[in-house]
Image: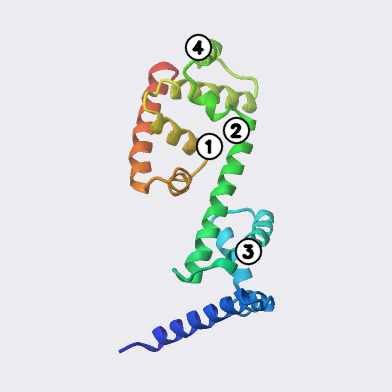
Amino acid sequence: MASYHDDATELRAEAINKLIRDYQHGDCNAFNRLMRQYEYWQYIYKALRAKRVPAADAEDYTQQICMRLMNGLKTFRFECAFESYLGLIIRNQVINDYRRRLKLRQRQFLSLDELTATDEIEKRLIDRLPNPNAPLADENLLWQELHHVVGACLRLFKNATVKLITCLWLYGMKQRQVAALLELSPGVVGSNLYRGQKRLRICLRKNYF
């Protein structure tokens, strides 16, 4: 026997689908009723913030997602629940945000291409490495030199997947974020990251500390 909660969920889904069909048949206000009545504006914004998207960006992305919904729902085939469809759009937006922020971080230090290069860049960086026991003038210089040291170690990695996952982790991304970005399972990311962290520690201890 269906519970009250199941009945309420089914009625909600039917009402949402009716609004979508009305919108598809030319009722432009049906979309606004859908978003207001079921508070999807707030739902989208809160979902973005829960994924650690900055507040200002979350507001802009909420508008962008709503525009995508306005276009996408015109051909929506009801092959999945509306909220599953909306969740996919939010997920793609979050991935795009991670990629954008990653590019900004790349500009501050070495790029991922430089970190994973196997040409003469590696030799030039290693040649520039300072004496690890020498005092550095200030904290900013310390971080810059440390970045070069880590980059030199990363370029010794032979496995490209381990190298890339370790780079993304060093740039501040969490395992689930890396998994979403590279479309890998969390388990694969976790095992490769463990290998990368272990090799990085060994390299740093052996060569620089």
Q: Residue at x 64, y 66 (%)?
A: 70
Q: Earlier in the sequence, mark 1 or mark 4?
A: 4
Whole-number angstrom distance, CA of label 1 to CA of label 2: 8 Å
Residue 33: which quarter of the image? bottom right
Label 2 Cα crowd, 10 Å radius (few <14 / some 14-19 / many 20+): some
Estimate the x, y position of residue 77 in percent, counting from the top left.
49, 69
Secondary structure category for the residue under label 4: helix
Estimate the x, y position of residue 184 in percent, counting from the top left.
39, 45
Estimate the x, y position of residue 50 in percent, counting from the top left.
54, 59
Whole-number angstrom distance, CA of label 4 to CA of label 2: 21 Å
Secondary structure category for the residue under label 1: loop
Label 3 Cα crowd, 10 Å radius (few <14 / some 14-19 / many 20+): few
Q: Are marks 1 and 2 in contact (CB under 8 Å)?
A: yes
Q: Identity of the amino acid at label 2?
A: Gln
Vertical position of residue 42 compared to residue 48: above or below: below
Residue 143: which quarter of the image? top right
Q: Which residue is mark 1?
A: 171
Q: Residue at x 34, y 33 (%)?
A: 195
The one nearer the camera, 168 or 1, is: 1
Q: Identity of the amino acid at label 4?
A: Lys
Q: Earlier in the sequence, mark 4 or mark 2?
A: 2
Residue 71's tag is: 3
Secondary structure category for the residue under label 3: helix
Indicate left or right for 172 with 64 as reference: left
Label 1 Cα crowd, 10 Å radius (few <14 / some 14-19 / many 20+): some
Estimate the x, y position of residue 193 in percent, counting from the top left.
38, 37
Q: Earlier in the sequence, mark 4 or mark 3?
A: 3
Q: Are marks 4 and 3 in contact (CB under 8 Å)?
A: no
Q: Which residue is mark 2?
A: 106
Secondary structure category for the residue under label 2: helix
